[in-house]
Amino acid sequence: MQLAASLDRLGTESAFEVLARAQALMAKGQDVINLGIGQPDFPTPEHVVEAAAKALRDGHHGYTPANGIRPLREAVARDVHAHRGVEVDPDAVVIVPGGKVTMAFAIMMFGEPGAEILYPDPGFPIYRSLIEYTGAKAVPIRLPEASGFSFVAEEVLAQITPQTRLLIVNSPANPTGGVVPQRELDILVDGLRRHPQVAVLSDEIYARMVYDGERHASLLAYPEIRDRLILLDGWSKTYAMTGWRIGYGIWPKALVDHATRLAINTHSCVNAATQYAAIAALDGPQTAAGNMMVAFDRRRLRVLDLLNDLPGFRCVRPKGAFYAFPNIEGTGLPARELQDRLLAETGVALIAGTSFGIHGEGFIRVSYAASMERIEEAIARIRTWLETR
Ligand code: PLP
């Protein structure tokens, strides 16, 4: 067999690899606490599950339009208006099987040899993987700990060259829990006037997970860049629906047909029952999603205190998502070694910062998508290990 060379450039998400190792240890009877996973530990709200079951009973068994059923795209437009204060044409919405697919489509539309794409580092590892897969040059945007893991807009603008085609922004962010302040977005958008060739992918999959009474600042709310802004969001995190595989993109007019054509060429459509469930999630009671956020917020503050109390650890206050990203340089161990030894020797699964890019060295990702008791137990195990090793 002669495989395409591009396959060698495809990276991966090591969270899945750590998950597999954690599961292997569990199968051997070890009590593993998994703080490595990037998904809520809550069930999908009951009324959402019921809507999917009803859709199947009602006979929604066939293909749907590739861009998604109209009532769902209308529900997305209403939701975006409610939470971001922006009017969206339902025909600009393309429903896809998970947030990742909007990401893949955007990167495929702009990436090719000779092109440059800017992406956050530390950041979701799939950005770099897909950029390199297309043959484009992946240019990391540094997210400094000192600025709460937000980018510095002037630094981002200084990295733009005539070859830059796409800029990826993720706020609130994986793996850091960082949120980009509104004023940095203002500076960024203002500076982008000088670079009209640069499109923007705003990954706002954690938009509803913002704490400390802050309101999510969306790049969709800037009319200046609306004609080149791709918004990525979905149901995975907000409604604990990671396994359903559904998300959406809001595309500028010039790109929406390309996105739909990519959908037709790849997955045809998201399964019909899940689309009905997604309507119920947006239009139905928000109690379960709200309760989940209250739980995440309580855990966030507890995790922050506990991590800052560990020898060799220091952690900036995460402002969004459900991750903390402590600096572990004081332990004297590289991130990967700390990850591997904590899993093998204490049964606690965390993800090395280096899994999220070169600027992730010296950090480790702690997902607080686990019960308070398990989080406390995990950090107690880490403390004992650090004190006795
Ligand atoms: N974007 C970011 C920043 C994420 O962390 C994730 C999932 O972890 C996704 C996108 C993908 O979400 P989905 O599971 O809906 O594909």
Image (cartoon, rainbow, N blue to C red):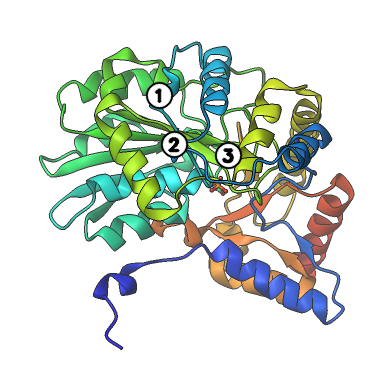
Q: Nearer the viewer, residue 215 or 53?
A: 53
Rendered-image quadrant of the N terminus: bottom left
Residue 160 got which mark? none
Give the image quarter of residue 54.
top right
Which residue appears at 61% of the width and 37% of the height? 275
Look at label 1 and name its amino acid.
Answer: Asp
Instruction: Say which element carries label 2.
Output: loop
On the question of residue 343 being in view, the answer is: yes
Q: List the residue tagged with mark 1.
A: 91
Q: Disc number at residue 177?
A: 3
| Residue at x 36% of width, y 39% of height | 260
How far from the left and from the top, in percent, is residue 92?
39, 25
How dense is the environment of label 1, judged by Cα within 10 Å: few (below 14), some, or many (20 and up)?
Answer: some
Specify which label sits upstream in the sequence, 2 or 1. 2
Element class at badge 3? loop
Alpha carbons under labels 1 and 3: distance apart: 32 Å
The tag earlier along the polypeptide, 1 or 3, is 1
Residue 296 occupies which quadrant of the picture? top right
Is residue 171 found left or right of 16 in the rendered image?
left
Check the picture and name the quadrant holding the C terminus.
bottom right
Question: Which residue in the structure is indicated by mark 2?
Answer: 67
The outermost residue toward the left is 162
